[in-house]
Image (cartoon, grey):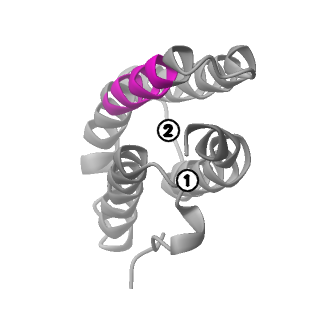
Amino acid sequence: MAFFQWEDKYSVGVPRFDMEHKKLIGLTNRFYEAMSAGKAREVMQETCNELVAYTRTHFSNEEAALKKSTYPDLINHQEEHKLFTKQVMDLQARLQSGETVMASSMGNFLKNWLVNHIMGIDKTYGRHLS
């Protein structure tokens, strides 16, 4: 069973962004599977790099759609994105420097952030864009 299973309750009602969220969940699950198989160290850096790249793409897509629709809470949404990007980039830098990072901490951080972000701030824009 997957570490983080997509459920309909995570849908923001915007198919494009639901698919992008599913991709982020897939990256989190791939990391967790490697961790469970004792191969977390081998994929941690790669997964972190992918997350940095993909979150930039996803956040850019969300922010462009929100700006186009004159979403009233765009500034706060952008700030949430900046905070997450900083956290993931800090993690990436720690891994690149050879610092020990607990695999379980990384997996739980990713899952918790995604659940809280999707169920909180993203649900709000879903109602706005629908």
Instruction: Look at the picture and state if 119 lies above or below 44.
Output: below
Amino acid type of the residue that numbered disc 2 sits on in the rendered structure: Thr
Under circle 1, the secondary element is loop
- The answer to whether residue 121 is magenta is no
Q: Earlier in the sequence, mark 1 or mark 2?
A: 1
Label 1 packing within 10 angstroms: few (<14), some (14-19), many (20+): many
Q: How many marks?
A: 2
x 60%, y 29%: residue: 84
Figure quadrant of residue 124 = top right
Residue 104: % across, % down: 54, 59
**What residue lies at 46% left-to-right and 24% top-to-bottom?**
65
Write down the quadrant of residue 51 in the picture: top left
Q: CA distance from mark 1 to mark 2?
A: 36 Å
- Residue sitting at x 32%, y 51%: 23
Reply yes or no: does residue 63 show up in magenta: yes
In the picture, measured across the screen, residue 35 lies left or right of residue 69, that is: left
* Residue 128 screen position, x and y as percent: 64, 38
Question: Residue 12, position in %: x, y?
Answer: 55, 53
Residue kind at label 1, given as amino acid type: Val
How many other residues sit within 10 Å of disc 2, few (<14), some (14-19) or many (≥20)? few
Query: In front: 102, or 24?
Result: 24
Furthest residue in direction bottom, as rendered: 1
Horizontal side, residue 42 vs residue 25: left or right? left
Q: Main secondary structure of the magenta part?
A: helix
Q: Kindly identify which residue carries mark 1.
A: 12
Q: Do tag 1 and tag 2 residues touch (Cβ < 8 Å)?
A: no
Relative to 57, 105 lies left or right: right
Residue range of the region highlighted in magenta in the rendering: 54-65
Location of the N terminus (image quadrant): bottom left
Residue 129 coordinates in the image, percent (x, y)? 56, 38
Residue of label 2: 100
